[in-house]
Protein backbone atom coordinates (compact mmCIF):
# COMPACT_ATOMS: atom_id res chain seq x y z
CA UNK A 1 0.00 0.00 0.00
CA UNK A 2 2.85 2.40 0.87
CA UNK A 3 4.54 1.95 -2.52
CA UNK A 4 1.35 2.50 -4.50
CA UNK A 5 0.68 5.78 -2.75
CA UNK A 6 3.94 7.47 -3.83
CA UNK A 7 2.91 8.24 -7.43
CA UNK A 8 -0.34 9.71 -6.19
CA UNK A 9 1.54 11.98 -3.75
CA UNK A 10 3.89 13.17 -6.51
CA UNK A 11 0.98 13.84 -8.85
CA UNK A 12 -0.85 15.71 -6.11
CA UNK A 13 2.16 17.97 -5.44
CA UNK A 14 2.55 18.71 -9.14
CA UNK A 15 -1.12 19.58 -9.40
CA UNK A 16 -0.88 21.93 -6.43
CA UNK A 17 2.20 23.60 -7.92
CA UNK A 18 0.43 24.17 -11.24
CA UNK A 19 -2.63 25.50 -9.42
CA UNK A 20 -0.44 27.87 -7.39
CA UNK A 21 1.28 29.16 -10.53
CA UNK A 22 -2.07 29.75 -12.23
CA UNK A 23 -3.40 31.49 -9.13
CA UNK A 24 -0.36 33.80 -8.95
CA UNK A 25 -0.71 34.55 -12.66
CA UNK A 26 -4.41 35.36 -12.27
CA UNK A 27 -3.70 37.62 -9.28
CA UNK A 28 -0.91 39.37 -11.19
CA UNK A 29 -3.13 39.92 -14.23
CA UNK A 30 -5.97 41.16 -12.05
CA UNK A 31 -3.66 43.62 -10.28
CA UNK A 32 -2.28 44.86 -13.60
CA UNK A 33 -5.78 45.43 -15.01
CA UNK A 34 -6.76 47.29 -11.84
CA UNK A 35 -3.83 49.72 -12.06
CA UNK A 36 -4.38 50.16 -15.82
CA UNK A 37 -7.97 51.21 -15.13
CA UNK A 38 -6.84 53.85 -12.61
CA UNK A 39 -5.82 57.12 -14.32
CA UNK A 40 -2.55 58.62 -13.24
CA UNK A 41 -2.57 61.73 -11.05
CA UNK A 42 -2.06 64.85 -13.18
CA UNK A 43 -2.29 67.47 -10.45
CA UNK A 44 1.51 67.80 -10.39
CA UNK A 45 1.65 68.75 -14.09
CA UNK A 46 2.26 72.43 -14.81
CA UNK A 47 -0.75 74.09 -16.42
CA UNK A 48 -3.22 71.52 -15.07
CA UNK A 49 -6.37 72.54 -13.24
CA UNK A 50 -9.20 75.10 -13.55
CA UNK A 51 -6.98 78.07 -12.69
CA UNK A 52 -4.82 77.44 -15.76
CA UNK A 53 -7.69 78.09 -18.17
CA UNK A 54 -7.41 81.84 -17.66
CA UNK A 55 -3.61 81.91 -17.44
CA UNK A 56 -1.61 83.66 -20.14
CA UNK A 57 1.57 82.38 -21.75
CA UNK A 58 3.98 83.31 -24.49
CA UNK A 59 3.32 82.26 -28.06
CA UNK A 60 5.78 79.40 -28.46
CA UNK A 61 6.23 79.76 -32.21
CA UNK A 62 7.21 83.41 -31.85
CA UNK A 63 9.49 82.71 -28.88
CA UNK A 64 11.31 79.89 -30.68
CA UNK A 65 11.73 81.88 -33.89
CA UNK A 66 13.13 84.88 -31.98
CA UNK A 67 15.53 82.58 -30.17
CA UNK A 68 16.85 81.16 -33.43
CA UNK A 69 17.01 84.53 -35.22
CA UNK A 70 18.83 86.28 -32.36
CA UNK A 71 20.91 83.32 -31.24
CA UNK A 72 19.74 83.44 -27.62
CA UNK A 73 18.93 80.39 -25.48
CA UNK A 74 15.35 80.07 -24.28
CA UNK A 75 13.74 78.25 -21.35
CA UNK A 76 10.19 76.94 -21.69
CA UNK A 77 8.36 75.98 -18.54
CA UNK A 78 6.11 72.96 -18.25
CA UNK A 79 3.11 75.25 -17.73
CA UNK A 80 3.85 77.23 -20.90
CA UNK A 81 4.13 74.07 -22.98
CA UNK A 82 0.86 72.63 -21.66
CA UNK A 83 -1.06 75.88 -22.06
CA UNK A 84 0.17 76.05 -25.66
CA UNK A 85 -0.83 72.42 -26.28
CA UNK A 86 -4.31 73.17 -24.99
CA UNK A 87 -4.70 75.92 -27.57
CA UNK A 88 -2.99 74.14 -30.45
CA UNK A 89 -4.75 70.77 -30.29
CA UNK A 90 -8.39 70.13 -30.95
CA UNK A 91 -9.29 67.07 -28.90
CA UNK A 92 -11.39 64.75 -31.02
CA UNK A 93 -12.04 61.01 -31.03
CA UNK A 94 -13.03 59.44 -34.32
CA UNK A 95 -14.14 55.96 -35.30
CA UNK A 96 -16.92 53.70 -34.15
CA UNK A 97 -16.32 54.44 -30.46
CA UNK A 98 -16.56 58.22 -30.71
CA UNK A 99 -19.76 58.23 -28.63
CA UNK A 100 -18.22 56.15 -25.83
CA UNK A 101 -14.67 57.58 -25.89
CA UNK A 102 -13.79 61.28 -25.71
CA UNK A 103 -10.27 62.61 -26.22
CA UNK A 104 -9.72 65.23 -23.53
CA UNK A 105 -6.15 66.56 -23.58
CA UNK A 106 -2.47 65.90 -24.11
CA UNK A 107 -0.10 66.86 -21.30
CA UNK A 108 3.67 67.07 -21.01
CA UNK A 109 5.42 66.27 -17.75
CA UNK A 110 9.08 67.38 -17.71
CA UNK A 111 11.30 65.30 -15.44
CA UNK A 112 15.02 65.08 -14.82
CA UNK A 113 16.50 64.00 -18.15
CA UNK A 114 13.30 62.84 -19.84
CA UNK A 115 9.70 63.84 -20.53
CA UNK A 116 6.37 62.06 -20.32
CA UNK A 117 3.65 62.70 -22.88
CA UNK A 118 0.25 61.89 -21.38
CA UNK A 119 -2.92 61.38 -23.41
CA UNK A 120 -6.08 61.83 -21.37
CA UNK A 121 -9.35 60.27 -22.50
CA UNK A 122 -12.75 59.46 -21.04
CA UNK A 123 -14.25 56.05 -21.62
CA UNK A 124 -17.95 56.01 -20.87
CA UNK A 125 -17.44 59.03 -18.64
CA UNK A 126 -14.52 57.58 -16.69
CA UNK A 127 -11.04 59.15 -17.03
CA UNK A 128 -8.34 57.00 -18.62
CA UNK A 129 -4.70 57.86 -19.33
CA UNK A 130 -1.88 56.42 -21.40
CA UNK A 131 1.60 57.89 -21.62
CA UNK A 132 4.91 57.60 -23.39
CA UNK A 133 8.34 58.44 -22.00
CA UNK A 134 10.65 60.44 -24.28
CA UNK A 135 14.39 60.82 -23.79
CA UNK A 136 16.67 63.05 -25.87
CA UNK A 137 20.21 62.15 -26.85
CA UNK A 138 22.51 64.45 -28.78
CA UNK A 139 25.40 63.01 -30.76
CA UNK A 140 28.06 64.77 -32.79
CA UNK A 141 27.59 64.19 -36.51
CA UNK A 142 30.01 64.92 -39.34
CA UNK A 143 29.02 68.60 -39.52
CA UNK A 144 26.55 69.22 -36.71
CA UNK A 145 25.04 67.89 -33.51
CA UNK A 146 22.22 65.44 -34.20
CA UNK A 147 19.28 64.98 -31.83
CA UNK A 148 17.89 61.50 -31.36
CA UNK A 149 14.58 60.87 -29.61
CA UNK A 150 14.33 57.61 -27.67
CA UNK A 151 10.88 56.39 -26.69
CA UNK A 152 11.76 55.24 -23.20
CA UNK A 153 12.31 56.60 -19.71
CA UNK A 154 15.47 54.69 -18.98
CA UNK A 155 15.82 51.35 -17.19
CA UNK A 156 13.59 50.12 -14.39
CA UNK A 157 16.71 49.65 -12.29
CA UNK A 158 20.44 50.23 -12.74
CA UNK A 159 21.00 46.46 -12.66
CA UNK A 160 18.09 45.79 -15.04
CA UNK A 161 18.77 47.84 -18.21
CA UNK A 162 16.47 45.80 -20.46
CA UNK A 163 13.68 46.23 -21.24
CA UNK A 164 13.52 50.00 -20.58
CA UNK A 165 10.45 51.74 -19.19
CA UNK A 166 8.21 52.70 -22.09
CA UNK A 167 5.33 54.58 -20.52
CA UNK A 168 2.29 54.15 -18.34
CA UNK A 169 -1.09 52.61 -18.96
CA UNK A 170 -3.14 54.20 -16.23
CA UNK A 171 -0.88 53.94 -13.17
CA UNK A 172 0.99 50.87 -14.43
CA UNK A 173 4.52 51.42 -15.81
CA UNK A 174 4.93 49.20 -18.88
CA UNK A 175 8.01 48.07 -20.86
CA UNK A 176 8.97 49.81 -24.10
CA UNK A 177 7.46 47.06 -26.28
CA UNK A 178 3.94 47.98 -25.19
CA UNK A 179 4.28 51.40 -26.85
CA UNK A 180 3.24 49.78 -30.13
CA UNK A 181 -0.32 50.07 -28.78
CA UNK A 182 -0.22 53.84 -28.24
CA UNK A 183 2.46 55.08 -30.67
CA UNK A 184 0.01 55.59 -33.61
CA UNK A 185 -2.17 57.89 -31.50
CA UNK A 186 0.81 60.08 -30.54
CA UNK A 187 2.12 60.12 -34.12
CA UNK A 188 -1.14 61.70 -35.29
CA UNK A 189 -0.26 64.80 -33.26
CA UNK A 190 2.98 65.45 -35.17
CA UNK A 191 1.49 67.06 -38.33
CA UNK A 192 -0.51 69.50 -36.19
CA UNK A 193 2.58 70.60 -34.26
CA UNK A 194 5.11 70.23 -37.08
CA UNK A 195 6.18 73.88 -37.27
CA UNK A 196 6.89 74.13 -33.53
CA UNK A 197 8.66 70.75 -33.57
CA UNK A 198 10.93 71.93 -36.39
CA UNK A 199 11.78 75.17 -34.58
CA UNK A 200 12.17 73.59 -31.19
CA UNK A 201 14.13 70.47 -32.03
CA UNK A 202 15.46 70.39 -35.58
CA UNK A 203 16.85 73.94 -35.58
CA UNK A 204 18.16 74.02 -32.01
CA UNK A 205 21.79 73.02 -31.51
CA UNK A 206 21.43 72.01 -27.88
CA UNK A 207 18.55 71.06 -25.63
CA UNK A 208 18.13 69.77 -22.12
CA UNK A 209 15.13 68.44 -20.24
CA UNK A 210 15.09 69.41 -16.58
CA UNK A 211 12.50 69.13 -13.84
CA UNK A 212 9.64 71.42 -14.92
CA UNK A 213 11.42 73.08 -17.83
CA UNK A 214 12.94 72.61 -21.28
CA UNK A 215 16.14 74.53 -22.11
CA UNK A 216 16.85 75.16 -25.80
CA UNK A 217 19.92 76.74 -27.33
CA UNK A 218 20.28 77.55 -31.05
CA UNK A 219 24.05 77.90 -30.70
CA UNK A 220 26.66 75.23 -30.14
CA UNK A 221 29.04 74.93 -27.18
CA UNK A 222 31.23 77.71 -28.58
CA UNK A 223 28.56 80.25 -27.53
CA UNK A 224 29.47 79.67 -23.88
CA UNK A 225 33.04 80.76 -24.59
CA UNK A 226 31.85 83.99 -26.18
CA UNK A 227 29.90 84.86 -23.03
CA UNK A 228 26.46 85.20 -24.60
CA UNK A 229 23.39 85.50 -22.35
CA UNK A 230 22.39 82.20 -20.75
CA UNK A 231 18.65 82.37 -21.42
CA UNK A 232 15.60 84.59 -21.86
Image (spheres, helix red, strand yellow):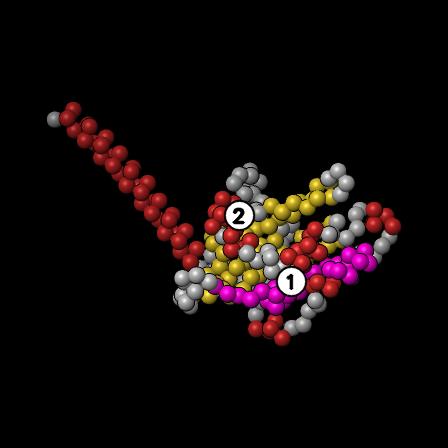
Q: Residue at (55%, 39%) from the top-left corner? A: 161
Give the magenta range. 64-93
Q: Report if residue 208 is visible in the image.
A: no
**Rendered position, 85 above or below 150:** below
Q: Residue at (62%, 51%) from the top-left corner? A: 114
Tag of residue 166: 2
147 horizontally vs 41: left or right: right
The residue that mark 1 highlights is 81
* Quarter assignment of residue 156: top right
Indicate yes or no whether the magenta region holds residue 173: no
Give how far apart the Cα atoms at labels 1 and 2 are.
Answer: 22 Å
93 horizontally vs 75: left or right: left
Q: Nearer the viewer, residue 159 or 84?
A: 84
Q: Nearer the viewer, residue 189 or 207?
A: 189
Q: Measured from the top left, where is residue 109 in percent x and y?
A: 60, 58
**Mark closest to the chain's N terminus, 1 or 2:** 1
Amino acid sequence: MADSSKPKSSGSCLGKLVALILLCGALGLGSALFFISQPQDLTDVGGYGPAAKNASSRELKVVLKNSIDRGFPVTLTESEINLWLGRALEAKQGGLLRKQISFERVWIRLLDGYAEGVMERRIMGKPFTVSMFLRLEQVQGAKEVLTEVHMDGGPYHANLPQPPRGGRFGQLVVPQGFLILVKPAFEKLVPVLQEEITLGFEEMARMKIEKGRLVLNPRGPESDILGLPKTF
